[in-house]
Image (tube, coloured by chain):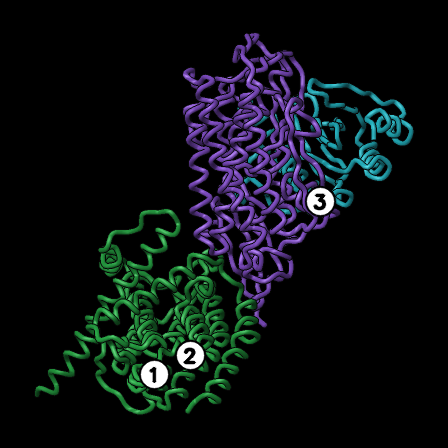
């Protein structure tokens, strides 16, 4: 399916005010609110046949937390979600895409983001006895 | 007095401990060298097995908590003792220390003792991998032992005697066992590979699955004795097959006995090493399948044919 | 029957890098498994924020020992895109050459490891001996066998003595390897003990592949036809013929066949690159500062899709780099692959996935 068709379907079904950017190397970035994420992913999987999630990037810009869901189906499509730094909560995707489990766990332990309804589990990469702050949060860098 | 000295020489030097020790190291070296050449490598120098053994004897000897020290120390010695006793009845280069009607059965029984000792080693040296390896070694024993025993009975039935020396004499008069009983010989070789736990039947000590199987927790002197026991078991097994199927030390033309026997033994080592280099390791259920569905019926068929053609 | 917990790792002859599987075993059946990663976690995503773009080249090359070149390739591609640079054509061809050589050596390494884990030590020796030819070629081109330092932002940096004669010799040596690799293919197709250990083991359907987002030869062996070299060509791949190998069986045997055939395809691509090598400069002048921006860069590593997300905030250090290596989704399928299998099949399953734990942990 063409990327423009995908964007059109997303616009119709989940996000009437869709902001679209293109990055160098051809990645299309779509801005969404946290509430629009799950319906968007459901649409992508159900209507557009886009179900390969490459990875989830978590990024602390200092002002807010950015979550990027990188999809790939012939072309790259990234869903960009902004979360407030104090209360970084978003719904999980593991019931739609089981492969998202590792990516969500990594983002949780690195950036202290909570995924609603993701079963709490042990650290994925960090040692079991890591009790300091999440490594990729900005305050750790200033210290 | 001279009887005592003769016995001591037989037990300790030839064909007893000293001779078998040297043979075990030699066979190990030939095996490793052949394997290396098949794999495009250089291979170890001739003194490598001896050097390895000496080094191992000097290493730290520890066992996990809960393992029985004296059982673990006794098992390799029991294994070694059984193989050494078995060789007393097997003609080595024409000399048999002792022979009687039925000594084939005694030898086959004695050669089963190392396998059971190996299995017990897995249980006595408490450890997850050892227990798994011990279980597998017992399953493997059940898979190959019945065809092996059946196949090794066929030369006895054919020659009309259950004494190994008599079987050799019979082959001297008529024909090599392997030529008239090819299926029996084949199953004998496969059974020997299973008994010696060589690839493709090195399932109990599968390095990539259960580290080292029953011997995982052994180290130092105990492990050195185990390696010696396995080496001696290899040599005795080869001698047994050479005598039962390849005519022992006799050839139809008159030649010195010792080189003929050595040559035939070397042929067996070559056969075993080639098979080890060629195949991947089977799974235990695949081996049980092979043992019960292919080897056992073939061995029984061989016996039926032997009984039919026996004079 | 009592249940035992068998630890596979962190140290185990099966694993070349530390990883911990705890298998709950009942007799000879695995009933449950748990996975613990992170033994080789070095915090590279955090470390790279304290180093400038050039120093990070050194860092990202060491994410993995086997696929080190493609990591630097993806990183350089991303930074060059942010800078708006056009890398010279000769450099792009050389990048393809090094990538394909790396693919060959990675697959041969894996073939040896699989054979060793199956007890077929002979093939381990043969495969790694062939791999030596490739490592020697890479050393001749770049000066390093494992880490090459051959990519720079803006192009490649190779041994200056390399010229057309060297390329002709390399082509000849690669041609000499083809016979042995075809024998490996023959072996996979015909050798019965290997087939007995790998067929029907570690089955993953195309549906499972898509749900876990598995990439690379593991996915292609289950019939999922994805290869970034053909679907989203980078470097000079748009000018080259890359045949994508897929298979339908979805078991360890299919993965073996796919990888061995990919080696043959890679050798053909190398021959094409060496014969069509254009002349020209190797690097292009690089501006001092990377402008603000973000980029998502992808490439087909030997194990599958490698993706880097880069964000620059205008300073000389990257603001955020996120790496997802191709082994990670394959590890996610381990729970399914290890369910209810024979204990002896564990080595086949773990080998079939082509683990690169240093990559997965970063």
From where the camera sits, is residue B79 visible?
no
Question: Which of the chains bears the disc numbered 3?
Answer: C
| Whole-number angstrom distance, CA of label 2 to CA of label 3 | 52 Å
Q: Do the residues labelled 2 and 1 touch (CB within 8 Å)?
A: yes
Which residue corresponds to mark 2?
B180
Residue with the most extreme right position:
A12
Q: Do labels 1 and 3 share a chain?
A: no
Give neighbour class at mark 2: few <14, some 14-19, many 20+ (Cα, 10 Å): some
Residue C244 occupies which quadrant of the picture? top right
> What colour denotes chain A?
cyan
Residue B285 placed where, x, y %?
Answer: 56, 68
Which residue corresponds to mark 1?
B174
Q: Which secondary structure, mark 2? A: helix
Q: Residue C104 carries which label?
A: none
Q: Do the residues labelled 1 and 3 touch (CB within 8 Å)?
A: no
Q: Do the residues labelled 2 and 3 touch (CB within 8 Å)?
A: no
């Amino acid at each position: 399916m063409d990327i423009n068709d995908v964007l059109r379907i997303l616009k119709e079904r989940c996000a009437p005010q869709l902001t679209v950017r293109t990055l160098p190397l051809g990645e299309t970035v779509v801005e969404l609110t946290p509430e629009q994420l799950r319906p968007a992913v459901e649409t992508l999987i159900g209507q557009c046949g886009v179900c390969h999630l490459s990875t989830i990037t978590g990024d602390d810009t200092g002002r807010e937390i950015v979550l990027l869901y990188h999809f790939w189906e012939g072309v790259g499509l990234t869903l960009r979600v902004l979360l407030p730094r104090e209360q970084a909560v978003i719904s999980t995707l593991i019931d739609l895409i089981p492969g998202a489990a590792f990516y969500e766990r990594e983002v949780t332990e690195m950036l202290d983001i909570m995924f609603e309804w993701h079963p709490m589990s042990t650290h994925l990469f960090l040692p079991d006895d890591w009790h300091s702050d999440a490594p990729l949060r900005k305050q750790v860098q200033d210290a | 007095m001279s009887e005592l000295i003769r016995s001591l020489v037989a037990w300790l030097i030839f064909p007893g401990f000293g001779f078998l020790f040297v043979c075990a190291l030699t066979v190990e070296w030939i095996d490793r060298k052949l394997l290396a050449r098949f794999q495009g490598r250089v291979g170890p120098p001739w003194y490598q097995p001896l050097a390895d053994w000496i080094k191992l004897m000097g290493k730290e000897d520890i066992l996990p908590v809960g393992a029985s020290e004296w059982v673990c120390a006794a098992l390799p010695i029991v294994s070694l003792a059984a193989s050494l006793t078995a060789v007393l009845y097997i003609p080595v280069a024409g000399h048999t220390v002792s022979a009687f009607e039925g000594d084939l059965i005694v030898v086959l029984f004695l050669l089963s003792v190392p396998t059971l000792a190996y299995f017990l080693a897995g249980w006595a040296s408490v450890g997850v991998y050892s227990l798994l390896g011990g279980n597998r070694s017992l399953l493997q024993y059940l898979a190959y032992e019945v065809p092996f025993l059946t196949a090794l009975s066929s030369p006895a039935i054919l020659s009309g005697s259950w004494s190994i020396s008599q079987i050799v004499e019979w082959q001297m008069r008529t024909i090599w066992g392997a030529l008239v009983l090819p299926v029996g010989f084949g199953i004998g070789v496969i059974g020997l590979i299973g008994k010696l736990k060589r690839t493709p039947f090195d399932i109990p000590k599968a390095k990539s699955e259960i580290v080292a199987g029953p011997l995982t927790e052994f180290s130092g002197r105990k492990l050195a004795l185990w390696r010696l026991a396995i080496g001696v078991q290899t040599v005795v097994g080869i001698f047994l097959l050479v005598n039962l199927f390849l005519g022992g030390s006799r050839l139809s033309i008159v030649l010195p006995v010792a080189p003929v026997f050595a040559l035939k033994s070397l042929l067996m080592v070559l056969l075993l090493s080639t098979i080890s280099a060629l195949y991947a390791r089977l799974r235990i259920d695949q081996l049980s399948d092979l043992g019960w569905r292919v080897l056992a019926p073939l061995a029984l068929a061989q016996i039926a044919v032997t009984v039919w053609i026996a004079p | 029957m009592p249940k035992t917990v068998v630890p596979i790792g962190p140290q185990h002859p099966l694993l070349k890098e530390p990883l911990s599987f705890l298998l709950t075993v009942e007799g000879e059946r695995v009933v449950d498994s748990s996975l613990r990663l992170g033994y080789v976690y070095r915090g590279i995503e955090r470390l790279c924020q304290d180093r400038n773009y050039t120093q990070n080249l050194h860092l990202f090359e060491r994410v993995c020992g086997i696929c080190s070149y493609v990591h630097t390739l993806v990183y350089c591609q991303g930074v060059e895109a942010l800078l708006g640079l056009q890398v010279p054509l000769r450099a792009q061809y050389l990048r393809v050459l090094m990538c394909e050589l790396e693919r060959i050596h990675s697959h041969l390494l894996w073939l040896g490891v699989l054979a060793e884990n199956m007890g077929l030590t002979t093939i381990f020796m043969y495969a790694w001996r062939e791999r030596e030819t490739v490592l020697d070629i890479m050393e001749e081109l770049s000066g390093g066998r494992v880490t090459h330092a051959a990519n720079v932002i803006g192009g490649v940096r190779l041994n200056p003595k390399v010229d057309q004669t060297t390329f002709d010799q390399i082509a000849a040596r690669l041609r000499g390897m083809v016979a042995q690799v075809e024998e490996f293919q023959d072996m996979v197709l015909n050798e019965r003990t290997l087939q007995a250990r790998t067929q029907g083991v570690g089955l993953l359907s195309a549906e499972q592949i898509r749900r876990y987002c598995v990439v690379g030869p593991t996915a292609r062996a289950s019939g999922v036809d994805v290869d970034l070299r053909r679907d989203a060509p980078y470097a000079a791949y748009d000018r080259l013929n890359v045949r994508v190998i897929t298979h339908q069986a979805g078991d360890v045997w299919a993965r073996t066949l796919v990888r061995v055939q990919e080696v043959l395809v890679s050798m053909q691509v190398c021959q094409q690159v060496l014969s069509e090598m254009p002349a020209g400069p190797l690097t292009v002048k690089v501006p001092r500062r990377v402008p603000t921006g973000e980029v998502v860069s992808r490439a087909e590593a030997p194990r599958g899709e490698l993706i880097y997300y880069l964000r620059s905030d205008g300073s000389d250090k990257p603001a955020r780099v996120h790496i997802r290596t191709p082994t990670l989704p394959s590890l996610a399928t381990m729970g399914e692959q290890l369910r209810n299998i024979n204990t002896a099949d564990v080595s086949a399953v773990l080998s079939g996935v082509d683990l690169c734990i240093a990559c997965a942990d970063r």
